[in-house]
Image: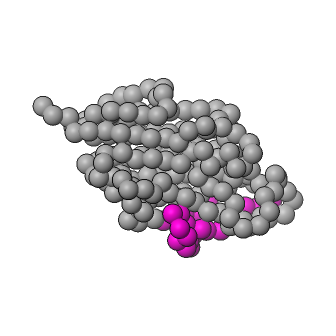
Amino acid sequence: MFEFVFYLGAFSQKLEFVRERIEIHAGDSLCSLNGRYYFKNNESYAMERTLFYPFAVNDGLPFPDSVFVRDLESGALVPFMRSGDGVIFAINIPPQAEKGYDVVYCQRTPQFTIEYLLTTTQKWGKPLERGEYVVHLPVSHKLKYISMNYDTSEEHDGEIVYMICRDNFMPEENLIVQWEREIK
């Protein structure tokens, strides 16, 4: 998956979206999502680009309650602006370098369903070198549905962790996870 799309300016094949790691922590009616995204600049000069990061927003998923964007190299928070069902922010990648950014948000999930937009990766015109998707559910909850086959699941520290890893990945569907409370 990948939710980033260029918002303004022409797309440059010299800047690539190369990989992502998404961690979803689901609870009763709230999810937190931490997305770590890596971009590669193949040019001999620094590139600054403005990106649009969309959220799945619908009747069952309101706009996130909190959002923050962080530059992994400096640790600094990156300013952003809300635009429709997403946020806009700038990235700056040094010449001939790879750089990472975190996007973290909390979204209410009253219907025990979260959707992470993966298909927007197609707008980059190239598959991700690697996509990792990790879903954490409390052991008091049960996975009802996940739109991608997971590779492993294990119980750890009061959670069941589902891991999905894909190489050379061009998503054709979004990641949708549904769960319920375990009744005992």
Q: Is residue 96 visible?
A: no
Left or right, 123 with reference to 180: right
- Residue 181 picture location, percent across and down: 22, 39
Question: Where, quadrant-wise, is the C terminus in this rendering?
Answer: top left
Quarter where residue 141 is shown: top left
Range covered by the magenta-colored residues: 68-95
Residue at left offset 65%, top offset 63%: 51
Depicted 165 relative to depicted 97: above or below: above
**Residue that sits furthest to the left in the current view:** 184
Magenta stretch: residue 56 in it? Answer: no
- Residue 121 picture location, percent across and down: 65, 47
Depicted 160 relative to depicted 105: above or below: above
Depicted 35 relative to depicted 147: above or below: below
Left or right, 42 with reference to 115: right
- Residue 72 picture location, percent across and down: 58, 59
In depth, the one of 144 and 79 nearer the eye is 144
What's the coloring here? one colour
